[in-house]
Amino acid sequence: MKKVLSVILGGCLVAAFAVFAGCSKGDSHKDLITGDFSAEATAVQRTQLGEALSSDSLWGDQSQDGWKFSIENVVYGYMDIDAVAMGESMVIDTDMDVSHLITLEKKDGALSLRGAGNMKMDMNMMGIQASYSGKAYNDSDYYYLDATVSALGQKQSVKQKMYLSEAMGIDLDIDENDLIGSFADLTPILESLDDQLVKIYIDDSDEQEQKVKIAWTADDFTQYFEDILNEDLGDMSGVSIDTGSLQVENFGCCEYYVSLDKDTGILTGFGSKLDFTLGMSMLVEGTSIQYTFDYDLTSWVMQTEKEASLPSDLSGYEFA
């Protein structure tokens, strides 16, 4: 039982940070970037938006000692993945409600980060039903959970950790200045600016912030999804997408939101809403695997004046 719960906990850890980068089922949440998005951006405004989002100081001057920036990441919704190969099915369903406050700081020439938050997650991992609720923390090296995990009719309280790079699914080098990309991937927005089929709306009515909404069509979203997959699979021998198999079965929305301080140019908010069901076939060493991705996921990364604090007992957490 302990081993099963450990595996489930590891899945919770990975799933929690995998979405750090994602319309939602929950009505209890509110959009954190709102405005009058009725006016489409002009060609000049699209160019200006690209220049603003390409700035190397979107979160201020990280090279300066004493630099500090805090963000609050809110993620909620679900991710369901179904894979079928040779008559066998594998299903991984995840419902989540995550809030995590992160403070990044440059002190004595070193860059560090710390975070604290709450997480509630329900998972179905290949037939094993599990749920998690508790506190989550991170420092520059590890991601920690103070959790109650329920599975197979039993509950277990755990205090466990894993490497932050593993939890996020990427190698986070905090000595690099490009920290924004670890928490808010602006690439889809920047790549959409020249695509006239992607609708961009700008609200300039607020005195302090410019607010932007980017809405993708189903066709553009499908093409972008396929391009990303082909890029990721490019270096993997024997793995490819079955040509023409990628189909959007249901498209609710693919929307991105940004807010920028008009005086400083600082990125004060970033959000995304994904609501789609997508099917595709992949060839792995000659074997066809049918995938269905069902997403209804909302994510916000917002600047805040609050700072994260860590408990004193993290050194006693065990590896998951």
Image: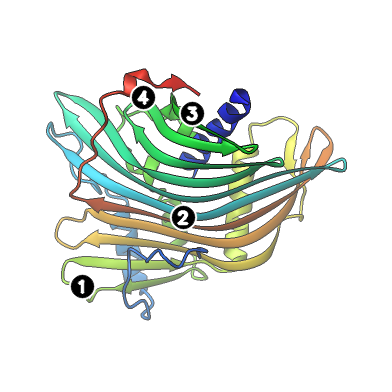
Task: Specify the amino acid type for callout 4.
Answer: Asp
Q: Which mark is residue 206?
A: 1
Callout 1: SS: loop
Q: Mark 4 — residue?
A: 141
Image marks 1 and 4: residues in contact by CB distance under 8 Å = no
Q: Residue 76 carries which label?
A: 2
Q: Mark 3 — residue?
A: 166
Earlier-in-chain disc, 4 versus 3: 4
Task: Specify the amino acid type for callout 3.
Answer: Glu
Give me the residue at 41% from left, 65% from top. 28
At which x and y percent is residue 102? 29, 41
Q: Distance between the residues labelled 2 and 3?
A: 21 Å
Earlier-in-chain disc, 1 versus 4: 4
At which x and y percent is residue 32? 33, 63
| Chosen colour scheme | rainbow
Q: Is residue 83 left or right of residue 229?
A: right
